[in-house]
Image: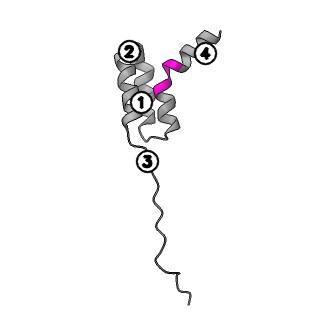
Amino acid sequence: MIHLLFLFVLYFLPALIAGGRNLHERTAITLLNLFLGWTFIGWIIALIWAIAAPAPYLVYVHPPYPPRYR
């Protein structure tokens, strides 16, 4: 039973990486992994895509001075 769980996690490793990195393409990576992961080429492509895609980041810009209240 533990072996099946390990194989399941290993099979969906690209999807887990994409979800953990909060990528915008995580749905596409998961679908590629789900439908073409069994070909091994599809699994490698999904893994490379999940690792190589730049992670989104949030930029917050503070105003240069406090806002004026009237």
Looking at the image, tell me whether mark 2 or mark 4 is earlier in sequence order. 4
Magenta highlight range: 10-14
* Amino acid at circle 4: Leu
Mark 1, other Cα within 10 Å: few <14 / some 14–19 / many ≥20: many
Mark 4 or 1, which is nearer the eye?
Answer: 4
Q: Residue at x 49, y 39 (%)?
A: 21
Mark 2, other Cα within 10 Å: few <14 / some 14–19 / many ≥20: few
Looking at the image, tell me whether mark 3 or mark 1 is earlier in sequence order. 1
The question of residue 59 being in magenta is answered with: no
Say the numbered circle drawn on residue 55. none
Q: Which residue is mark 1?
A: 29
Closer-to-camera residue (44/35): 44
Q: Residue at x 38, y 15 (%)?
A: 40
Asked which secondary structure carries label 4, the reply is helix
Structural distance between the alpha carbons of marks 1 and 2:
14 Å
Structural distance between the alpha carbons of marks 3 and 1:
15 Å
Q: Residue at x 42, y 30 (%)?
A: 29
Does the residue at mark 4 contact the one at mark 1 (Cβ under 8 Å)? no
Does the residue at mark 3 contact the one at mark 2 (Cβ under 8 Å)? no
Asked which secondary structure carries label 3, the reply is loop
Colour convention of the picture: one colour
Q: Which residue is mark 3?
A: 56
